[in-house]
């Protein structure tokens, strides 16, 4: 459908006169041409067109949007005041808040919400229309002047189609809906919808997902802030599950849609049960990685669910065409003796995704290639963070049958995969690739009853280092940037790409404090109506931005505050308090001299407070001391060569033991009545036994160190030195005793002549 027709069909009747005049702008582009297509486009034509689109149409739309948004905000504030007046107090019981008044208030909220939705559609349609008419101008009349770059900047400056202006209002409306619903229907346990994050379900567990853009200038600082609390996981390119210390993996996600981009439209408009299908793999396709076919479904309440299974490269085309039902994978699972429930679940998932692909005539249209850095504690998925960099979107479609981007007989682009092409993809047509200028940060937190979100995550989210984009989608952005001529609706975050997302640290901190204060005020109204006070944590303003300040400046400010606020006699009471990432208070009771070694490195402090804190550190509520070290978590995976090396060392010691024992037994047996020889034989036997026992002791000790994943050194010089010294002493003593014995025997022999005496003397 052409955009002109889409605009006419989607126009909201009461605001019909406030939309951009798309037909007039199109006629101005064809003005003065008549039937002659070679009619010149003059300077006056260019001035008239630019004056009409920038000074008349854009100003009209932006002013109406600002006026309507302000009116809706005032109506929402008035509704909140009405709700505040219905809250019970000491002289007014809760029953006075009649159901009829609440029903009227809910009807008013319904009207406001409907107009907010219409205003959002109004902004999106006009935003798309301005970009399309600017592109049409540059293509038809842009020989000397290009207005599209200027148009993108102007749209961004006017805030047209920006989510930042709608989220606070919608969050306030959601909070009021929650209060009214809980009052009228006490059985309804639904929580208020928060537009700042999305809910996801994985394996029956609930997660909240936060998405942000990160400017390249802030990327290193964000990574270091995360690394203070979570280790980085670097996966091999062959498997996403094996940590091998290589560089971050290259991930490719192949997205599916049909020629009408129905999945794109449903996902962008947040329609009920909107789905997206992608085929994902790590590394290069020539390396035969595991392919994962995934379907993500977003439900009406904002939650999402993923269905996925693995498939081999050689069966992918047949499966997408509906000719292969994953029979071989099912037969393999049956041969392995897997449970019937797992087999049935795999079969049902494969069949559902295949039916969805065939029914909707889906085919690969776009791929997203990026480098992922993951942060997560081993065997602990409560907090998972990923940062995607070097993001590139590439066309994978066959919409143009004469010049398809992908061979219709293949399911992927062989020109990219066969050559192992990587970012920035300079060897393909540059009109088929779009590079994203920022990194994408995603934080997923498992929702658990009674567990607070880590404080350092709140600090990172509220800092100047990240730019919130809660509804960002790689699939939607890739389609919007590569197939603008094929779609009539664009995502709201496109205008944010034309602005500098970097923020002043102090300004960002102040804006965050104001936002939290407004949320706390709104929540207080709801709590007063419901008669609850502990449903939300109370708001406490922060003294300074935790991210914007340096370590030394923050410690200096903390010490100064502590010396002014806390009296000296309270120093002994706070010795047992602990400052951890889940607590908001920082204990600091003793006045310390700033600038000393102990102020910069607290571990060097010898004060009574520091000693007590190290000895009596307490864990916060809800946090238990782990049973095992973090390094010992997870399954034990040790290469066989480690065990064999330990056993080879043991066999060497046993070889020395056998040699010494054989020598000692031979010496003891041949000694006869020689007492010295018998004693030396016994000494050699003791040394042999000591070597054998030492080898056995080290075998067991090193085996325990391997199992415990100890970081200590495996070498030990005591045993070899002891055996060597004992053997050297025994040999020296043996020589001395043998020499004395021989000397005594020769002295006892009588000498009959001078020649014999000289001979004996030479022998001695």
Image (spheres, rainbow, N blue to C red):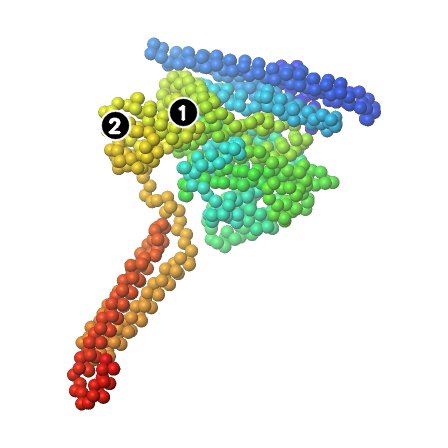
| Whole-percent x, y for residue 752 in the image | 18, 90
Residue at image coords 49%, 30%: 466
| Whole-percent x, y for residue 247 in the image | 51, 45
Please, is residue 762 above or below residue 604 in the view? Answer: below
According to the picture, the residue beneath numbered tag 1 turns out to be 544
The foreground one among 104 and 660 is 660
Q: Dot 2, crowdedness within 10 Å: few (<14), some or many (≥20)?
A: some
| Whole-percent x, y for residue 318 in the image | 62, 48
Dot 1 or dot 2: first in sequence order is: 1
Labels 1 & 2 near each other (Cβ < 8 A): no
Residue 690 seen anywhere in this rendered image of the structure: yes
Residue at image coords 64%, 36%: 258
| Whole-percent x, y for residue 758 in the image | 23, 85
The residue sitting at the top extreme is 91
Residue 399 lies in what quarter of the image? top right
Q: Which numbered marker is on residue 74?
A: none
The foreground one among 50 and 756 is 756
Please, is residue 554 above or below residue 603 in the view? Answer: above
The residue sitting at the front extreme is 754
The foreground one among 664 and 749 is 749
The foreground one among 463 and 70 is 463
Mark 2: which secondary structure?
Answer: loop
Q: How many marks?
A: 2
Please, is residue 68 above or below residue 201 in the view? Answer: above
Residue at image coords 30%, 29%: 593
Tell me: 357 left or right of 142: left
Residue at image coords 18%, 87%: 751
According to the picture, the residue beneath numbered tag 2 turns out to be 571
Quarter of the image that includes the C terminus: bottom left
Q: Dot 1, crowdedness within 10 Å: few (<14), some or many (≥20)?
A: some
């Amino acid at each position: 459908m052409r955009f002109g027709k889409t605009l006419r069909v989607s126009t909201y009747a009461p605001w019909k006169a406030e939309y951009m005049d798309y037909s007039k702008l199109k006629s101005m582009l064809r003005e003065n041409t008549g039937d002659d297509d070679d009619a010149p486009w003059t300077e006056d034509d260019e001035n008239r067109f630019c004056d009409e689109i920038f000074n008349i149409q854009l100003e009209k739309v932006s002013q109406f949007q600002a006026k309507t948004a302000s009116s809706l905000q005032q109506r929402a504030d008035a509704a909140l005041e009405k709700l505040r007046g219905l809250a019970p107090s000491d002289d007014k019981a809760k029953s006075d808040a009649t159901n009829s008044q609440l029903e009227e208030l809910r009807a008013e909220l319904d009207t406001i919400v409907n107009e907010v939705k219409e205003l959002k559609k109004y902004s999106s349609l006009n935003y798309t229309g301005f970009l399309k008419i600017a592109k049409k101008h540059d293509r038809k009349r842009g020989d000397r002047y290009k207005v599209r770059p200027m148009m993108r900047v102007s749209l961004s400056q006017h805030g047209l189609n920006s989510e930042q202006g709608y989220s606070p209002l919608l969050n306030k409306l959601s909070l009021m809906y929650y209060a009214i619903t809980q009052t009228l229907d006490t059985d309804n346990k639904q929580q208020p919808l928060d537009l700042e994050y999305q809910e996801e379900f994985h394996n029956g567990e609930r997660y909240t997902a936060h998405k942000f853009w990160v400017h390249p200038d802030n990327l290193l600082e964000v990574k270091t802030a995360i690394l203070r609390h979570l280790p980085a996981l670097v996966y091999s390119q062959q498997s996403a599950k094996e940590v091998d210390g290589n560089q971050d993996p290259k991930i490719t996600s192949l997205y599916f849609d049909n020629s009408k981009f129905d999945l794109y439209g449903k996902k962008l408009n947040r329609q009920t049960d909107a789905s997206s299908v992608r085929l994902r793999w790590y590394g290069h396709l020539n390396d035969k990685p595991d392919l994962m076919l995934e379907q993500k479904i977003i439900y009406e309440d904002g939650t999402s669910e993923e269905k996925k299974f693995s498939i081999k490269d050689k069966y992918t085309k047949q499966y997408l065409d509906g000719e292969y039902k994953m029979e071989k994978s099912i037969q393999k699972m049956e041969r392995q003796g897997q449970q019937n429930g797992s087999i049935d679940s795999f079969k049902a998932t494969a069949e559902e995704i295949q039916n969805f692909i065939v029914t909707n005539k889906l085919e690969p249209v776009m791929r997203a290639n990026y480098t992922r850095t993951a942060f997560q504690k081993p065997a602990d998925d409560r907090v998972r963070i990923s940062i995607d960099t070097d993001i590139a979107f590439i066309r994978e479609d066959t919409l143009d049958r004469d010049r398809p981007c992908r061979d219709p007989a293949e399911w992927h682009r062989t020109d990219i995969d066969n050559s192992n092409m990587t970012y920035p993809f300079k060897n393909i047509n540059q009109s088929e690739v779009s590079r994203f200028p920022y990194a994408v940060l995603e934080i997923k937190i498992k929702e658990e009853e009674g567990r607070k979100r880590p404080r350092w995550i709140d600090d990172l989210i509220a800092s100047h280092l990240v730019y919130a984009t809660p509804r960002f989608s790689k699939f939607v952005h890739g389609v919007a940037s590569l197939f603008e001529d094929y779609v009539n609706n664009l995502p709201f975050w496109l205008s944010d790409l034309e602005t500098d997302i970097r923020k002043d640290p102090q300004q960002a901190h102040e804006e965050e404090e104001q936002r939290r204060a407004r949320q706390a005020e709104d929540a207080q109204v709801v709590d007063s109506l419901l008669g609850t006070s502990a449903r939300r944590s109370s708001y406490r303003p922060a003294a300074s931005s935790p991210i914007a300040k340096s370590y030394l400046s923050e410690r200096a400010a903390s010490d100064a505050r502590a010396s002014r606020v806390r009296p000296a006699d309270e120093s002994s009471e706070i010795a047992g308090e602990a400052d951890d990432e889940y607590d908001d208070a920082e204990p600091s009771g003793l006045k310390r001299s700033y600038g000393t070694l102990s102020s910069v490195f607290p571990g060097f402090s010898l004060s009574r407070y520091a000693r007590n804190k190290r000895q009596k550190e307490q864990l916060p509520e809800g946090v238990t001391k782990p049973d095992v070290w973090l390094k010992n978590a997870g399954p034990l995976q040790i290469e066989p060569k480690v065990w064999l090396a330990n056993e080879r060392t043991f066999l060497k010691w046993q070889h020395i033991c056998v040699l010494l024992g054989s020598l000692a037994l031979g010496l003891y047996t041949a000694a006869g009545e020689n007492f010295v020889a018998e004693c030396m034989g016994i000494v050699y036997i003791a040394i042999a036994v000591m070597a054998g026992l030492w080898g056995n002791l080290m075998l067991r000790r090193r085996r325990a160190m391997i199992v415990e994943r100890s970081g200590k050194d495996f070498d030990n010089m005591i045993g070899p030195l002891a055996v060597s010294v004992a053997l050297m002493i025994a040999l020296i003593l043996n020589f001395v005793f043998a020499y004395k014995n021989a000397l005594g025997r020769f002295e006892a022999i009588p000498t009959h002549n001078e020649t014999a005496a000289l001979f004996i003397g030479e022998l001695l």
